[in-house]
Amino acid sequence: MAEASPSVHALDASYRPFPSFEQWLAHTTLDDGRWRRYLGVIDDLTSRLDTAARRRAYEIVKRAAAIDTGAIEGLYEVDRGFTFTVAMEAALWESELAKKGEHVRSLFEAQLHAYDYILDLATKAQPISEAAIRALHAEVSRAQATYRVVTALGPQEQALPKGVYKTLPNHVRTRTGTDHSYAPVDVTPAEMARLVGELRSEAFLAAHPVIQAAYAHYALVVIHPFADGNGRVARALASAFTYRAISMPIVVLNEHKNQYLDSLETADQGNYQAFVGFMLDRSLETIKLVEESLRSAALPSVEEAVASIQRLYVTRGGYTVEQVDAAGMSIVDLLAGELVQLSRRYVIHPILVNVSIEQMSYRPSQEGYREPVKGGRAVSIRLDTPPPASATLERRYWVEVPKDAAGSDDIVLTNANATHDTFTARMDELVPTPAGMLQARIATFAERIVRGMLPELSAQAEKKLREQGG
């Protein structure tokens, strides 16, 4: 948003140019141990999946990035449930999006096109150019006709120039009420040329993709080359480098907004490491969401597995179990947490679902972990089919906590019958409140549990039916 002020010249003079990439490198570090470990899991999973399954996993994170990038700019409001309903294309996602208004759908589609544009640019390994950045702005703002300008006469809506550098100053009033200077209009073309030169330098091209993404994002925001939409362009541009390296964008959710702005303001004070750390955290969360999606993709869909069981309850005359034995029918019992949400998304009768939380004692599966002090706790998930094809399947997951926890240590849910089947969440994802990306992973994990159980349940039910001569 532009700030009309009698001190425009003073604000222009206060502009602090973005650092060279060499300066950026001298003040930042990145420990990529977890990055490499997470990617190793992704590589193993993708090697065992077909193209469609891989594409689906990467599409989810792209859609999450696209829907929330506009919310960060205040173009519309989102919450966790809405973001991941749209991202995962869950049931009724289009109607949920429609409730926000046609303008929100148009903005989302434009932002989605912008990420497709960046993905195409990264896939072709084309060097970043000023023309490409201007084209990215045209893509991301294609559905935005105007932007608000604060003038001496008050706020006004003006036509938004697309794909061209600003022609009016766009200094802003910050959250703290102070004025912040961006590149003056006459300096902007030279600064953009300097930025592109840095992005093509040997040092930059040899750097870690998160370092590249953080630098490109920060430098573009410092310049603020466009009348509006600079944040959306910066987040998409940053994703070009992770797309090029690992085929996925960096997802910055609206719930990260305060932390995001804080890290940018800290970088303005010369502490670039804070923003690099922020971008690394977001990239790791993105990788973990892709991992859960890939794990789910390796299993039959809920609809397919349920259909195979439902066929057991259809007579030769085409009657359903509800018609034949309605008294013996039951739908889904109340599930805790994300399992409740899963049962609402899918019609899974005639299966009975029971979820309970149990107090129990067990030996942790790994060194350095223990039961909770007040006693071990486990979640038991049980699936049953009614007669004539009676079958039962149960999974139990207990919680293990680190003995000496730091923010990056994991809380672990372990399958009592298969210790390699685990779900992990960092302490700082849980405290002070569960993070949005964690909520998405838990939902995907819950679906993976049920999708893993259904085929085995189907086999047991078919065997029972044969034994009864059904």
Image (cartoon, rainbow, N blue to C red):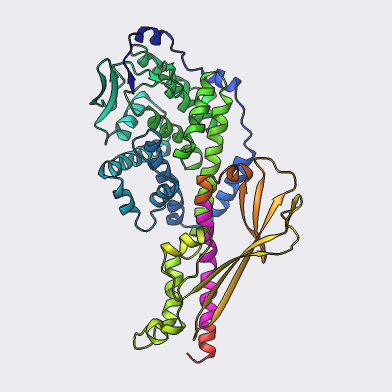
Q: Nearer the viewer, residue 321 or 237?
A: 321
Query: Is 329 placed above or below 89 here?
Result: below
Q: Using the rendered image of the protein, determine whether residue 207 is visible from the camera's viewpoint.
A: no
Rendered image quadrant of residue 445: bottom right
Q: Is residue 392 magenta?
A: no
Question: Closer to the camera, 350 or 328?
Answer: 328
Q: Residue at x 40, y 29 (%)?
A: 231
Q: Quadrant of residue 206?
A: top right
Task: Classify 343 as above or below 428.
Answer: below
* Image side of residue 399 versus residue 160, left or right: right
Q: Residue at x 45, y 56 (%)?
A: 53
Q: Is residue 423 visible?
A: yes
Kindly give the residue lying farthest to the bottom in the view shown.
Answer: 469
Q: Is residue 72 left or right of residue 48?
A: left
Residue at left offset 34%, top offset 85% = 318
Give the position of the N terminus as an image quadrant: top left
Residue 252, given in percent of the width and then of the height, sits at 47, 38
- The foreground one among 49 and 20 is 20
Magenta residues (range) = 441-462
Is 443 part of what is drawn in magenta?
A: yes
In front: 403, or 444?
403
Magenta part, dominant SS: helix
x and y percent of residue 410 in the render?
A: 65, 47
Q: Give the x, y percent position of residue 357.
A: 62, 64
Give residue 139's position: percent from left, percent from top.
Answer: 31, 34
